[in-house]
Image: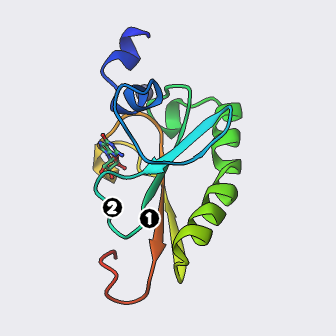
Amino acid sequence: MSQETNDCIFCKILAGEIPSAKVYEDENVFAFLDISQVTKGHTLVIPKAHHKNIYETPAPVAEKLFSSVPKVANAIKEAYSPAGLNVLNNNEEAAGQSVFHLHIHLIPRYGKGDGFG
Ligand code: 5GP
Ligand code: ZN
């Protein structure tokens, strides 16, 4: 593990050093439930390669990450039957990024009063 990934919570999840609830996995990406779900089924999708955020991610890695989103979205739809779904990506602290390993939030929506937005 490189120095950069040593202190990364999401790299530790990928390595199985921190437990997580898996939603989807393929050779390039891993999806798991957010530890503090803003709504039921709130999921994070991450590339298996460590990149800080969208600015520092090579296009082929970003392509594989973003192209996995429909599959993860459908897995969430199947499991939770939400009324809708928000897809979000925060880059840098000013935009709300708190874990510096690129990730996409998939936030199932259940209508007014579901606790998000
Ligand atoms: P950000 O604020 O960087 O866009 O999102 C980071 C997300 O990672 C937050 O929603 C936070 O709840 C989630 N998170 C932080 N630590 C852990 C962890 O150890 N396990 C899981 N499953 N999620 C985490
Ligand atoms: Zn990482």
Left or right, 18 with reference to 66:
left
Q: Are marks 1 and 2 in contact (CB under 8 Å)?
A: yes
Residue 112, given in percent of the width and then of the height, sits at 37, 90
The residue carrying mark 2 has its beta carbon less than 8 Å from ligand 1: yes
**Callout 1 crowding tier (Cα within 10 Å): few <14, some 14–19, many ≥20:** many
User: Mark on residue 41?
Assistant: 1
What residue is rendered at 51% in x and 30% in y?
Answer: 56
**Callout 2 crowding tier (Cα within 10 Å): few <14, some 14–19, many ≥20:** some
Q: Nearer the viewer, residue 50 or 24?
A: 24
Left or right, 7 with reference to 27:
left
**Image mark count:** 2
What residue is rendered at 40% in x and 42% in y?
Answer: 20
Instruction: Identify the residue position indicated by label 2 in the image.
Output: 37
In which quadrant will I find the N terminus? top left
What residue is rendered at 71% in x and 49% in y?
Answer: 67
Which three-letter amino acid code belongs to the residue tagged 1? Answer: Gly
